[in-house]
Image (cartoon, rainbow, N blue to C red):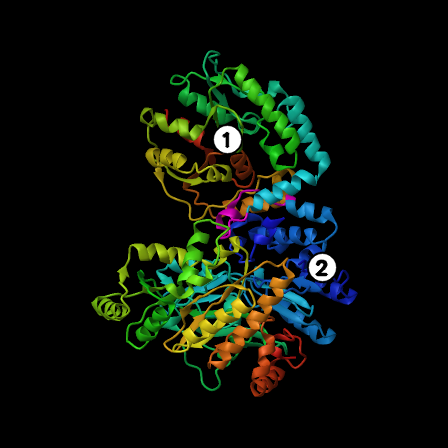
Amino acid sequence: MDTVYQCGSCGYCLDTCSVYATTFTESLSPRGKLLLLRKYGEGVLTDPSSLTERLYTCTLCGKCEDACPSKTDITGVIKNWRNNHPFNEEVLRSSLQSVLEKGNPYNKSQFEREEWCTFNPEADSDIGYFPGCTTSLLQPQIGASFIQVVKDLLPLQIIDDVCCGSILSKTGFQKEVQEIMEKNTQYFKERGIKTLITSCAGCYSFFLEYPFNVKVLHTSQVLTDYLSELQPQNICTTYHDPCHLVKTSLTSQPRHILKTLSDYSEKETQACCGAGGGMLLNFRELADSICKNLVRGLNPRTKLVTACPFCLYHMKRNTFQKILSIEEFTASCTQ
Amino acid sequence: MTLKTKITMNPPAKMKTTLTKIFKERAFFEPEDLICYSRDAVPCLEGMPEAVVQPRNRRELKELITSAQKEGWNLIPRGRGTGTFGGAVPVDGGIVVDFARMNRIEEINVDRHYVRVQPGCCVQTIDFELAKNGLKLPVIPWSSPGASIGGFVATNGVGLGSYTYGRIKQQVLDLTVITGRGDELSLGSVTEYTPGYNLCELFVGSEGTLGFITSILLTCINQKKHTVVSGFFKSFKDTLSCVRDIAQTDVKPYTMIYDDATTFNFVREVTLGNPQATIEKDKRDTGGYLLLAFESFGDEEKNTLSAIFSQYSARLNVGGMSEGLWNNLSSFLPKVYRVGLISFEDTFVPVDSVYDVAVQCWEKADELSVRMFMGGYVASRRTLVLFPGMVVNERDFEEVENVKKAKDEIIKITLRHGGGISALGSDKVNYMGEYPERAQIMQQIKEVFDPYHVMNRGKLGLR
């Protein structure tokens, strides 16, 4: 409860919050949410359900925390509430069920999941490539592109039959997530994995929270090692920072790739795409509005590149412009 | 202590119907929405609105005023709710008019050096856009990353740059307003020159009691790189004497910030991330520092300052460490929230009385067991803004009461020394009683613009 008393209403968070910047609704702003929790704690507000909807209207991007001068743990407080107050339970439970039974939150079969991979993995390697559910099922070209670049250079196992549990950790299933983490840790151990490479920003940041002794890398960190093998392209690029990578301070490697292999320019502003934290699942219309604000005004001659399959998927849904993953862009430099 | 705000669950049916008709989904009545407008950045002051609306344009504002005139509603304009004196707090209920959606930059004219903005626009956003054109606002509020330009104008704010360029009223060229009578007026021009009464200045600092500001034309200046200099002094008294000496010269810093040793140590601890930082009151007068930013810093400035500093056995530091201090201290205030909420009492004190005022404030703080730190900045050659900040735990009833008492005492001490207070908001409204004749004239002026008393009733002690 002390955390919610730390907010001094300075308003530094307002413009950093993609939900507030799109809705202008104070009760959906970071400082508004903290005040609601405070008033609930004081007994002024008594109906938790009306708070729950507002506290789920958050991408958990953490940009408000970066701006907060008093460094209030805003996303921590929100996640804590979510763990105790389920929302949209039917839909979220079905995601949970799908993760537990099918190893992905999209209710798709393992057969569909493996369609992207035509590569013969090396079972002996202790390096695992973990594309992540969103890559495999919604943006399979990302995994294929990564393999195209590294297949002759890096011996890899493919681990594409489990979910890391990140989405569940954001939507109130902390207990179940603990079980998934334990199960996955055991599974990686059985497969002899010492290094785990993933294309997904969400998986990457969540694996860093795993209590296991495995080195976790994002594909952009791996690709930077092979730039000398690649051919620079005569195109203009810019980069969208996935929030999960910003939170884990992984911002320079994707830029390094783009600066080396293209005519790169920095985007004027960086904002959350609006899909994360269960927003696309629970508030699709709002998530789309946030994203439309983000992609509006993109220069059509400059290719937007990102390093997260979920950002990519969401942005593609909201613009006709071509957007690339860092893996696709890099693969285009092999020709 | 638990501050409990009474929730008015059901606004009058007619209010709900009318506001929904005008503002559609931008009219809010649910308690969860209303409660978020029950306070601003001042601790220990709350009030629940009956409704909140978010206008998009002047037509909606005019319709709102017409309805308010008929129904006797009280309309409380709000920028981004970052004020430190309760200016946007609906202490007596009413309809909060949130300008969040009237946030456009309407025009940047590089040749004429002006920018035209809507009141809900964030000051930082304006500065960001101006920077692309090589321009900047002359004066920036201390709360810049959060503050709206409308709130800054409505409270006639001072801030970074005020020593050179004055208050915000000196930067406003024109205001478009809708008065409480419902008239839409332009009060100035793109030049500084308009005949007769200065109606623009009348609205600047009127705290939303005369009408809604819908468009603001502000002067801009060319961007300049700052040179930051600083000095550490043996005592707070020496620091303030040095400020006084500098103010008597022709040296013109863009801004001058000062703090006592206790505050400096406290802020340093806080900015280093120590939430347990304490205010060591026994070290108060054992030192002080001065931080100055210059838009133009040459030999004349350097020699003058060095000579003054040396009189107090202080060394002038140019750039380097001073730059680091500037980055930390020019925006330190909200960082202090890591320790607890802070109640600020910004008072305007004559340059030669600041030390006496500070000592008396410290004595009162000790008497009331209030955790007080002290600093401020120089507003003009004559005036220093003294910023006693008091750490307050809102759940501690005794501390809340003591901080309230301390705030009253600070104002009394300031007034006794010929000083003044700036905006009143809801927090300091009682002090209008110190100026009964002025209050009477202000009421008469209010009657001209707001004869139906729909605009921010109670603020400035007016009906």
Is residue B86 shown to the viewer in this render?
no
Q: Which residue is mark 2?
A: B29
* In magenta segment, residue A57: yes
Per the rendered image, the range of residues in magenta is: A56-72
Q: Determine which of the numbered discs, if any, sits on residue B13 in the image.
A: none
Q: Nearer the viewer, residue B242 or A163?
A: B242
Q: Which image quarter: residue B282?
A: bottom left
Q: Chain of mark 1?
A: A
Local crowd size for mark 2, using a 10 Å CA cut-off: few (<14), some (14–19), many (≥20): many
Vertically, is B206 above or below A313? Answer: below
Residue marked by disc 1: A208
Query: At label 2, which amino acid type do we have?
Result: Phe
Secondary structure category for the residue under label 2: loop
| Placement of the C terminus of chain B among the 4 image quadrants | bottom right
* As drawn, B452 above or below B338: below
Image quarter (top left, top right, bottom left or bottom right) of the N terminus of chain B: bottom right
Q: Is residue B243 left or right of residue A87?
A: left
Horizontal and vertical percent position of residue B302:
24, 66
Main secondary-structure element of the magenta-colored stretch: loop
Q: Nearer the viewer, mark 1 or mark 2?
A: 1
Whether labels 1 and 2 share one chain? no
Q: Indicate the position of residue B309 as horizontal and vertical percent values.
A: 27, 68
Above-or-below relation of A67 to B362:
above
Inspect the magenta stretch and tell me whether residue B148 lies in it: no
Residue A5, above or below A94? below
- Tell me residue B71's x, y (percent): 74, 73
Label 1 Cα neighbours within 10 Å, binned few <14 / some 14-19 / many ≥20:
some
Question: Visible in this render: residue B248?
Answer: yes
In the image, what residue type sits under mark 1? Leu
Left or right of B165 on screen, residue B91: right
Q: Nearer the viewer, residue B225 or B98?
A: B225
